[in-house]
Every structure is written in C-alpha cells, then in structure tokens.
Image: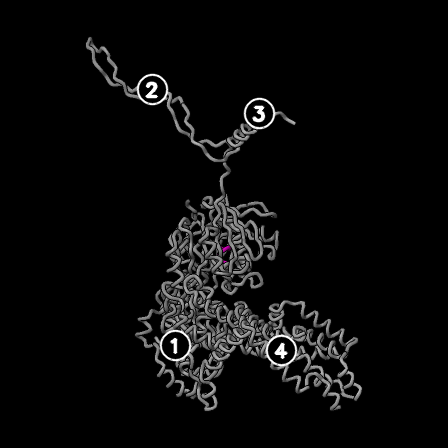
Amino acid sequence: MSQIQAQSPVVHPVRLRSQRQRMWHTFLSNRPAIVGLVLVIIVILAAVFADNWFIALPRGEDPTPLITTFDPLKQDARNRLAEPDAEHIMGLDSYGRDTWARILYGARVSLAVGLGSVLLGGVLGTFVGTLAGYIGGKTENIIMRAVDVLMAFPSLIMGLMVLAVLGAGLSKMILAIGIVLSPTFARVAHGATLTIKENDFVNAAIAVGANRMRILRVHILPNILGELIVLGSIWTATAIRVEANLSFIGLGVSPPTPAWGSMIRDGTQHLGYAPWVSIFPGVAILITVLGFNLLGDGLRDVLDPRLQQ
Amino acid sequence: MLSKKTTLIVIVLLAVLALIAAQCGSATPQTVTVVETVTVIETVEVVKEVEGKTVTVVETVEVVKEVEKEVVVTATPEPKEKVVLRYADKAADLGTMDPHFAAATNDRNLADMIFNGLLRYKPGDGSEIEPDLAEAMPEQEIVDGKQVWTFHLRRGVLCHPSDEVPAYELTSEDVVYSLQKSANPDRSAYAGEYDGMTVEAVDPYTVKITLDNPISPVLFFPKVSDYAGGFIVCKKAIEAMGDEGFKTHPVGTGPFMFESYSAQDKVMLTANENYFRGRPQLDGVEYRYMPELNSRELGLLSGELDVINGAAEGVWVERMNQKEGIRVDVYGVGEVATIHFNTSVEPLDNKLVRQAIAYALDRDEFLALFGEPVAANVYSQVPAQFLAGGLTKKEVDDLGLEYALDRDKAKALLAEAGYPDGFSLKMISSERESYLKNYQSMQAQLAEVGIDIEIEVVDHSSMHKLIRQDVNPIVIYVAWRPNADVYLTRFYHADSIVVTATKPDTNFSHYTGIDDLIEAARIELDADKQVEMWKQAQIQLLDEMISYPLQYQNQVTARNINVDFGHELKSVLALYPQITENTRITK
C-alpha cells in the first residue's frame, strides 16, 4: 500500500519541492497578484487591529480602539453628518459616529462573512461534489441535478431566500451565503473528481482494498485542492459583495454593528450633502473585492493544473 | 427619366407645398396686423348760431373709423393643456382607498381629496373645524339624558359618477349609511370611535346623531369631520361594487374623482366638474408611489414632479430651500414619538428602573437626529403644541417631572432597584427612519448606564404586527391622534391593552391606572375641567414613568414654487400639504 501511495503525484517529496519553487516564482512575477495580496493583507490587518481585543479579552476587559481612537458605536447626534476633517478623517455618519472607525470594524463583518461562508460552502460543496463524482450512477445524477437547480438561482436571490427562512444576523448570513456558494464548489469538485478517479493510482488503491472515504480523502481530495483554493479566493470576493448587498437591503447584522453594506444604505438619503457616509464604505468594498479577485487570479495561475500545462 | 426643367418645376412645387403645409399645420401662434372698422365716441367743436349769435360748442359724436389692430392667430387652434399636479409620496404602493380603513399616510392623502365629512378641518389648519357637507355647525340638545346633534345637509352635493352608478345627489340616506359603516368593526378600522352612537335620517337633508353618553364638542366633532371614520361614502356606489371593489374604486363627493390605479406606480385623480365649492383649478392629480427619496428629489429638480414628500431632516430642508425654484414646507400636525415601557414584564415592572431609563435619556440627543424645524421636544403624552390637554415644558418642570438627563442618578436608581450592572433587553424596530433613529439613539444612550439593547430591524408592517403581539419590552411608537381623549384611551386605557384586552389596541405599557380619569374627562362638558383631568392623567403617567414622550415630527414636503396650495400651511391631519379645489399651478 505504501508503494502505491508513493506513486501518487501529490506526495512525491522531490517533485513537490521543485513544484513549490516554481509556484512561488510564478506568483511573485505576477504583479496584479502581489497588489491583490497586499490589499487583502491591509484589510485583514485593519480588521484584526481595529481594537486590542487580543490583549483585552484574555484579561476579561472591554477592548478599546487601537488603529482609530474613536468608538464605532459612540453617537454624537449634535454633530451628525460632519464633514471629514483632521479629527474625523472620513467624517461622521447620520448618528454622529466616526465613519473611519466603523469601516475598520466593518471589515470584521465582511471578512467573517467572506471567509466563513466560503469555508462552509467549500466544505459542503466539495463533499457533495466529490462524493457524486466518485460514486457515479443514479446518486451522481440526483446530486448533480439538485446542484443544477440551486445554481439556476442568482446568488443574491438565493441568499435572500435563505435569509427569509433563517432571519437576519451574522451567523445566519454566513450560513445563507455558504449555501449559495456550495453548488459552485460541488460542480468544480465533481468535474475534478471525474478526471482524477480514472488515474492508475486510484485504481491501485481500489485494488488493494482501500475504502471509498479513504480514497476520497487521501487520493482524490489532495489532487483537486488547488482548484478549490483558487475558486475559494475568487468567491470570497463574491461573498463579500453579496454580504454588502444583503446588508444594504437591511438583511445583514443588527444595528449598531457596523457593516459596509448597511453603512452605504444609511448614507443614501444624505448623498446630496454628505456623500462621505456612503462613498468611503463603498471604496472599502471596492478595495477588498479587487484584492481578493486579483489574489484569486494570481493563485489560479499558480495552482490551476490546466494553466500549469 | 424626367427632364431637368420638369425636375426643377417639381422641386419648386414641392417646396411651395411644403411651405403652405408648414403654415397651415403650424401650431405656433403668429401675430398679424388686421384692419377693423370700429365705432368710437369723439368730442368735436361745432359752430352754431344761437339766438342770432355765432358760438362754438363742444359735442360728442359717434365716429366710424378704420383702425389697425395686432391679433394673435393660429392656423389650427391649440388644444388646452391639462394642468395636472404631480405628487410623489414615499409609500411603495396603495393600501386601500376605502377611507374607513385608510390608516397609512398615503391612503389618508387620497381619501382627503376624494371624500368630504359633515364637518371639515379648515384646509391647511387642523386646529379649526368648519362645516363641510353640513350647511352649518350642528346644535346639540339633551333629550332623556342623551345628547342629540342635528345636521342640515347642503343641497346639490353630487356623488362622483362611476361605472356602476351615475352621479346623484347626496342625501341623509348616504350619511346614515356611511356613519353606520364606520361603526361596523367588519367594515371599518375606526368602529370603536362610534360606540354608543345612533344615526338617523329625519328627512333627505337632515341627519340626527344621538349619543348615549354626552360628550364635549372637542370630542364629538372629530368623529364627523373629514378624517378616518368621519369621511362620508356614497351608498349606491359602494352597494353596487361591494366593499372590496370600493377599495380600489372609491366614490365620494370631494374635489377630485378617482380615475385609475396602476400598482406600485400611481393613482390618477381627475377634477370633479360638479364639486359643490366650484370646479377645482387643477384638471387632475397624479399621485405617484416613489419610496426612494433620491428619485423623488431628482424628479422635483428636473421638473417631472411638482410636489414631493421630503426627508424629516433639518439639513435636507435647508439644502432644498437653497435650490432655485424650490420651496420646502414644514408643517404640522406633528406625529408624536413616545417610548412606552411594558410594565408587566421584568425589570420594567419596577418603577425605579423606568425612572432610571428616563434619567439616562437625553431628549435633545434624539431631537438632533431630526433637527429643527422638522422636530421639537414634547414633555407629555399629548402634544401641548397642537392639542388641548397637553403639558408644557414649564408645567412638567414645575412638577419636577421633566426627567432631565442625569446618568449618575440613573445608575443610582438602577442600583437601588437591584440592577447595579444593568440588564439586557431584546426588541424589534421598524426600518423606517422615524423609528429606527429613535431606537438606535436609545440603544446608544442606555448603553452608557449599562443597559444593553439588542435590536432586530424588520419591515414597517411586520413591526406593527409584532408589537401588537407584545414582543417588545419597550415600544417606540410614532403617531398622531386627533385629541387628548383618543391619545389617552388608545395608549393607556385598560380596554386598549395589546393582546389581552377585549378590544386590543395600542396600550403597550399594560397600564390601567388612569382609566377613571380618562372616562370622567370624556363625559365632562366643561372644557376647562376636561383639560384639567387630561393633565392630571398625564402627570400620573409621568410620575409612574409609564411612557417617555420624546418629540413630535413635522411633515416635510418640497414643491415647485409655481405650486400654490390655495391655503396657508399650518397643520394638516392627512399629513400632506392638502390639495383642494383652490390648489393651482401658476406658470
């Protein structure tokens, strides 16, 4: 059995090392991908260091703002809609809250939803897709037709439908968008599994009596992981966009938690005289979505086996 | 092939024909000089011989002259352009046009244009009531302990024609039918207002209304005025089309008649040529549904709309007033926002907790979210600025019931009540700004004293449904009621408690402590004593901190300066600038 595993292209140590070096070289020579990576890192840093939760929470204290000095929930209605100035670099919103502070904290919601839903959708879709692809027959037909039905709905409509059943809230939104994304992962995983399962090392594993789950876990999944990571990075951008859309129409996190989509919505009524309330969160979404898309494109160049060929 | 000469002739002929056609078909008016023969009177000096002497006398004579005159002519007379006022409201769609179910502002607006009452609130000034379908204000008499009001109807008032019924004269039969419909809970949302009322037709133009319990004119007149159940519907039309059909094809006697309805788009009204106050100056009204403020604003600025429902924002008012050709009207009646505490649940059943919350709140902070002149603070449940029976700031101040911001005192009261670390509450809010702003401001302010509030935002109609199921420990409600009795009865009488009362309404606090005062004031005929009882009731509400009055929110509409509503805008119960027969668009 160990000999058969050694034939698998994934676990060959010499080939891996050279392949990894080539991947890094390809990635680092792709300037848009580097820009994407930098943007994503900036957003992640902003989300992580918006306050000192990593120090305060272990001590049982309330976190205090770190990057900004303002509390994103603190209202100052008497100065609402104040223009950007040296103190409030992105101005105040319609409740007199600091827009910059809310954008920083809003990044947490966007990243939580973006990464959480992709992880959920990825795990769910990959499991269903690989299972259907490997088992084949009627099971495959039933699963993939169900996936087709789910894919027929536009992502926003699908998200709306799920949230209409579950109700609003952060965890429910992650679940809703995860369900929305899962058919895409299922289809990609299914196609990749169909290709991989015909390889000799899979047949050899079957011949020595490996069970289905082991074959899926040890021989098929590692070989389709590259494609799924590429898909995940690109769909993170989509998930963030869908989250912003859902928050915009009022199905996002409950107030006063800042979320970029709901921040834009709050500002639409004041666009004529306080455009900063909507524009800055819009720019934040633009930067984040652009970052993940560029990063995803770069990863695809590196990890997609078809492009490698 | 045509010869060059023939081609030239054809071209010249075509050109001449084109010129003639252009002249004949042109709709552009032209000024031409014509010679007219006119007879004018002139003074002339005539030499006459009088008694042998030659004298000159001045006489007037008629002279026929030819004069040149400039006249404007058009080859074909231009058809007169219809003058239709285009109004855009923030509502997404029509609810109902049955005036006895119209509760949403946009539905009330349409009812106001289509229907009349026996009496009416003076256009643009809701503080005055005057005769409408009635010839004069009614007289009252007490017969066998019952109060009888007699109305004499105007003659010649015509119900609008409809597909089913042609126009016909409104008589006492229609009035009796209409008020009986208002009193029927299956056919009206305002049936409770008409309990103990008997309506009968004495003759075709006389209606007698008998009340089992006498009430003051202040309480009686709103029941028969042009608002809610007081609107008079036309019996034959509603019987012909049924209650359901009537909701989308209303027939009344007002200055405008229903023409068409396009879902989520608009309602078209046309001028009632036979309106008893004279034909409206407008040919019609286009009432559009446009929930997006930016769309309404752009429509007004581009000239595609004449009047729009604006934002309840001081800064918006200021900005729009700076636009050329645009004026913003800010007027009453102000809908009052009040925080109601559910006294039947922990920890709000504790008076100290409720008072702590009151001391933790800053009215001016709430007010700043709307800005003046759109909103102003109120200090009692009945707004003293609009209605008799309300308490002024000075009055509550003198009584020590203002609950001015004092968060240290709030924390001390919470500690005394056994909640030194505060507590948590969950509640829902409407998505509408007038609600959500107040809820979010309250959330932020109470967080300062350790009270953690979790808010779930739902759509407006869901909020109304859910708060009536008692899901909120604290309810913020924004409403206008026509008098102190209605305010106090619907929000604080035991019969109005949500869910559990026999006639559940909007008593969200579950309070029953002022029932006696409400009932005594209702049958008090001395106006001063009545007002005093209403004030006493509210003093008790404030002392017990059953509810915390916040602010009234005025109505805001923007218009093209060419629009003249035909009345001064002070306060309108229908919550729009009121479009009447006198409204016009000047070019």
Q: Chain of mark 1?
A: B
Residue at horizontal 66 percent and vertical 86 percent from the top: A14
Circle 4: element type: helix
Circle 1: element type: loop
Mark 2 / mark 1, whichever is N-terminal: 2
Q: Is residue B520 above or below residue B279?
A: below
Prevalent SS, magenta region? helix
| Numbered mark located on residue B62 in the image | 2
The residues tagged by marks 3 and 4 sit, at their Cα atoms, a distance apart of 81 Å
Circle 2: element type: strand
Q: Residues within 10 Å of mark 2 (few under 14, many from 20)?
A: few
| Numbered mark located on residue B361 in the image | 1
Can you see residue B332?
A: yes
Inspect the image, locate mark 1, and give the three-letter code of the amino acid beneath it.
Answer: Leu
Q: Which residues are magenta?
A: B107-111
**Residue B110 part of the magenta-drawn span:** yes
Q: Which residue is mark 4?
A: A229
Verify CB contact (< 8 Å) between mark 2 and mark 1.
Answer: no
Q: Nearer the viewer, residue A174 or A134?
A: A134
Mark 2 / mark 3, whichever is N-terminal: 3
Location of residue A116 in the rendering, given as x and y in whole percent from the top left corner: 58, 79
Location of residue A130 in the rendering, given as x and y in whole percent from the top left corner: 71, 79
Can you see residue A261?
A: no
